[in-house]
Image: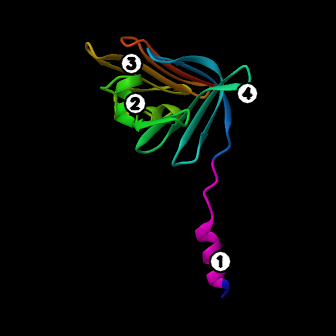
Amino acid sequence: MTIMLFLLLVGCSHKEPSKEKSRMIVWKTESMKYADMGFISDSGDVISVEIYGVGSALMRLKIYNDRVCMSQFRCMSRGEFNNQHLNSHYPKELLTHIFRSQKIFDGAKTKREKQGFSQKIKRDGVYDILYRVTKQETLFRDRLNNIVIKIKNIK
């Protein structure tokens, strides 16, 4: 009986999300422009990004394994999100990797740096990306498409 109760309790327990972390977030694309304080939380299955301005949420983004939802009203596949808001040639998992400060494009052209790494990835006429991850910040910049996603740690 005790074992069954234990299994029931463990089986019904939910994975606790990681603690929200305060960040300065810059998001600049053709369709969206934000630069303000926000929160990022990562439960393993979902990355939640919220950007605030004057005490209210300006943008809410939930990144799932198969879709991206914006402000809880519109969900779309990760590929569709890239097509509409980033670049259709980006890998579907790009946002996940940026918000987890992981290597992008399967680690292509990674250069180890003192406090992290950088990647310079270019495809003529399609994208020109500088991606840098340090302890202080994560910066994704596509010069060709005028896209910037910057996440700065707040101490």
Q: Of callouts 2 and 3, which one flags the residue occurring earlier in the amino acid sequence?
A: 2
Residue to which mark 3 is pinned: 129
Few, some or many residues within 10 Å of mark 2 (<14, 14–19, 20+) = some
Residue at image point 51% right, 49% down: 45
| Residue in view at x 46 percent, y 16 percent | 29
Which mark lies nearer to you, 1 or 4?
A: 1
Marks 1 and 3, the one that precedes in the sequence: 1
The kind of residue on which mark 2 rests is Phe
Task: Answer with the quarter of the image where residue 126 lies.
Answer: top left
Q: Which mark is residue 155?
A: 4
CA gap, disc 1 to disc 3?
50 Å
**Residue type indicated by callout 1:** Phe
For the residue pair 122 and 117, the one nearer the viewer reads as 122
Looking at numbered disc 3 in the image, what kind of residue is underneath it? Ile
Q: What is the distance, in whole Å, between disc 2 and disc 3 at their CAs?
A: 18 Å
Which quadrant is home to the N terminus? bottom right
Q: Quadrant of residue 131?
A: top left
**Label 2 – label 4 distance at C-alpha:** 31 Å
Sequence-wise, the earlier of marks 2 and 4 is 2
Q: What's the residue at 60%, 29% (across, down)? A: 135
Residue at the limit of the structure toward the left, as seen here: 124
Magenta segment:
3-17
**Which label was assigned to residue 81?**
2
Residue placed under numbered mark 1 in the picture: 6
Decide: few, some or many residues near mark 1? Use Cα within 10 Å; few <14, some 14-19, many ≥20: few
Q: In the orientation shown, which residue stands out farthest toward the bottom? A: 1
- Determine the CA span between mark 1 and mark 2: 42 Å
Q: Residues within 10 Å of mark 4 (few under 14, many from 20)?
A: few
- Place of residue 59 in the rendered image (x, y in percent of width and height, measured from the top left): 58, 27
148 drawn magenta: no
Tell me whether circle 1 and circle 3 mark residues in contact (CB < 8 Å).
Answer: no
